[in-house]
Amino acid sequence: HPIYGEEHTVIGAVGDGRPVNRDQFILMDGVDRVVPISRPFKLASREFSLQDSAFPLNGISIDPGHVVIIAGPCSVESRTQILEAAHAVKEAGAHALRGGAFKPRTSPYSFQGMGEEGLELLAEAREQTGLPIVTEVMTPEQIPLVAKYADMLQIGARNMQNYSLLKAVGQCECSVLIKRGLSSTVEELLMAAEYVLSKGNRRVVLCERGIRTFETSTRNTTDINAIPVLKAQTHLPVVLDPSHGTGHWEYVTAIARAGIAAGADGLIIEVHPDPDNAVSDGGQSLKPERFAEMVKQVAGIAGILGKQLAPQVS
């Protein structure tokens, strides 16, 4: 598993756990040193790559010097809704559009998404705004269909340990965003990323979206600690989802500010033109004007840290 840097190349030699004689490698021509990686997540480890991962996403750059904001509704509900949301978040400063066409829901009677029709509407929104599309894939069988329309495949919290799905997206050319599971540890999140990386896909983003605790005043408990912990342990980009982290739109902006202050590389925010009538997660969705104000505040905090919002697609 090679990583080509400006000054040196790192070769990750991943085996099956049996002892290896390191001398056989250090004696090879061109080898400067051999560093054993003690962590169970090898390719995701900061020991494997001291440089932060960076990669393009259909016109934008995901890199350590910029903050990327992904925004849009929880679900694609109609052509009017998704196009209005896409233009609104683009105008406010978003870099990519989120929206669910396939939705894993707790109740089998809840809205499950529009399927391929929803994907087609997302593609139309991208054509009109230029925004890359981030949308969820739920099964290995869905990957060819979703990848035909999407720029980044989202692995939802309920599927973080769906290993067949992780292996399959690892063989896909799309970028991948992995959300932390509802009751998963940081190490389990990194091991999920390792499944994708081990299959050859290096364009992986990690997402902290809150975990399940005893607290009931918010939908989940946003683990702000996870952001600096992840930044210390992995070279992969880390984004925060304060919408699912709180479950209440009133708290989203405050937690978004906290996430950027803690070192997050980006945010994924639910934005809906009419939250009161949303078919899913309306209570945690920002109206476009509130989202625009949040973007301004986040940009100010990023500037204090020596970062800036990523350039938008034209």
Image (cartoon, grey):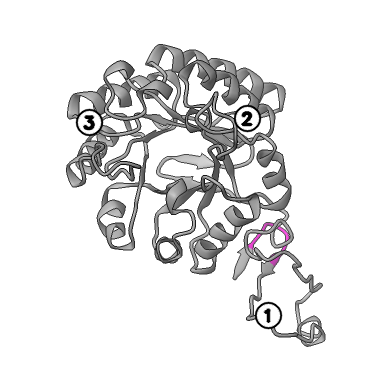
Residue that label 1 marks:
17
Q: Label 3, label 2: how many angstroms apart (C-alpha)?
A: 29 Å
Amino acid at circle 2: Gly
In the displayed structure image, the side of residue 309 where residue 158 appears, left or right: left
Q: Gap between marks 3 and 1, in whole Å?
A: 48 Å
Image disc number at residue 77: 3
Horizontal and vertical percent for residue 237? 59, 45
Q: Are marks 3 and 2 in contact (CB under 8 Å)?
A: no
Q: Residue 221 placed where, x, y %? A: 59, 33
Q: Residue at x 79, y 82 (%)?
A: 22
- Ranked by sequence position, the earlier of labels 3 and 1 is 1
User: What residue is rendered at 34% in x and 51% in y?
Assistant: 137
Instruction: Using the image, determine if residue 161 lies above or below residue 114.
Output: below
Q: Amino acid at mark 3?
A: Glu
Q: Is residue 307 left or right of residue 199?
A: right
In the rendered image, the quadrant that contains the N terminus is bottom right
Which tag, 3 or 2, sits closer to the chain's start? 3
State which region is magenta.
Answer: 4-9
Label 2, on which residue?
Answer: 259
Q: Amino acid at mark 1?
A: Gly
Earlier-in-chain disc, 1 versus 2: 1
> Is residue 7 highlighted in magenta?
yes
Q: Secondary structure at mark 1?
A: loop
CA distance separating discs 1 and 2: 36 Å
Q: Which mark is residue 30?
A: none
Query: Residue at coordinates 43% horizontally, 53% vertically from top-left?
Result: 159
Q: How many marks?
A: 3
